[in-house]
Amino acid sequence: MDVIDRYVYAVVKRLPEKSRAEVERELRANIEEMLPDDYEEADVHTALLSLGNPAALAEQYRETKRYLISPELYGNYIYVLKIVSVIVLIALPIAAFAEVLTDDRGDGPFDLLIRAFVQAILMAFQAAMPVFGIVTLIFAFLERADKKYSQWPYTGKPWTIKDLNEAPVSDSRSIPKSESIFSIVIGVVFGIAICFYPELLAWYSNDNGDWSSVPIFNESELRPYIPFLLALTAFSVVIATLKLIQQKWTAHLAWLNVLVNVCDIAFICTFFLDPNLVSDAFVTTFATNLEADPDSFRGIWDNSMLGLAAFLSIMMAWDGVNGLIKARKIS
Amino acid sequence: MSQFEELLSAFEVELKRGTLTLAVLSLLQTPKYGYSLLQDLVDKNVDIEAGTLYPLLRRLEKQGILTSDWDTAESRPRKYYTLSPTGTQIFEKLRDNWRNMTRQIDQLLGGEQDGRH
């Protein structure tokens, strides 16, 4: 194969099909012009060297810049990736440890740690990579969507001075990022644990190297709650994500927050006050370990559940009111 | 390359980018083929490389600024480029812009020099 053919091929193979023939014809004509009548190999080399790197030449011939995510969106992309990595980094060790515990092979604590560590690395590839991929895909999609919606202030209209009010400012109205990230991680980890691995939430005891566990919940009693629990978890994660994006309380956000808290309170009251939900075996184990009388302990347990439900409800109510108060400070 | 030279060349590239197009358009009021245009530019001390010029011609043609015509009568086929009617209009506007711009910049640069002396 002639060196000119190789050069031309190196250029056009990097171009879209439809422009190849024309560029090739032009390029060959131009190269020929650069050569004297009786040319030698060395003349060809000089001509080709003066045209430069074929990859760079092909890049010049391309009409449109090619990228997955443009520099304008890149900042937001990296910001979201960072937050997602933090969430993954916190959730992974928990998930890995849970996975290792369910797959108990009677190992000692040291072996368990090693296996949890290996599991975390495995999960990093199994879970983190798709998550990164999905974030990248979403941004690649935004890149191809109408720019006016994918760029701040995301309204599809030119920005106004009023939009500046919506930008995060650091004062008493601001919501710390850590708070939102924390609630996403807790929400996801416990939501998944209760819904898919209820047997993991258990009393663990070690008798002479043998691990045994007594699950907290009666699985059949738990099952009807799962759709609600999943919906609530999803709802909470959406709200936490909104908090993460806005980073400050607004009236809309505060009312959404009240709504999710009201749902939470309703759920907590039914969930914690359901007498059949917690297994008798668990209460008995608990009582035995506290050296209490199992029969009278059931009463104490039910009262504690009532107390816990009341405490959590008050916390939720306060969180809702707090959001409203902070949002009110805007106007 | 030292940091200073790198910085300088980045600014020079930026400064030159628009002027190359203007130089090319000015010479294409009469039809020329790629290599002869390159020679003309080099003769007039315009610093341009073949690898930059040829894709530029093609881009301008796609934008409707230039029209092209293959001449296959000679032993070597040649693609002749020339300004389209739109291209002529754009060239004239750009030329006026350039003159205004250089006048303004000259005033600024001249003023600076006066201040120092």
Image (cartoon, coloured by chain):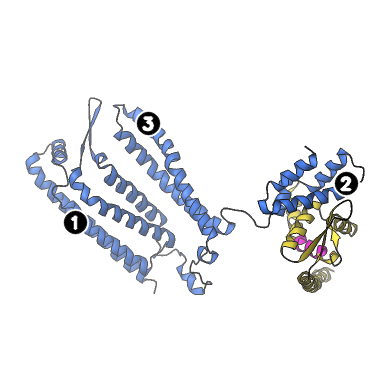
Chain colours: A blue, B yellow
Badge 3, how many Cα within 10 Å: few under 14, some, many 20+? some
Q: Which residue is mark 1?
A: A269
Instruction: Measuring from the top left, give residue B16's x and y in whole percent.
Output: 77, 60
Q: Which mark is residue A35?
A: 2
Say if labels 3 and 2 share a chain. yes
SS under mark 3:
helix
The region drawn magenta spans: B15-24
**Front residue (pair A158, A33):** A33
SS under mark 1:
helix
Q: Which residue is mark 3?
A: A115
Farthest right residue in view: A38
**Which of pointers 1 and 3 lies earlier in the amino acid sequence?**
3
Query: Could you tell me which quadrant the C terminus of chain B lies in?
Result: bottom right
Badge 1, how many Cα within 10 Å: few under 14, some, many 20+? some
Q: Are marks 2 and 1 in contact (CB under 8 Å)?
A: no
B55 inside magenta stretch: no
Q: Are marks 3 and 2 in contact (CB under 8 Å)?
A: no
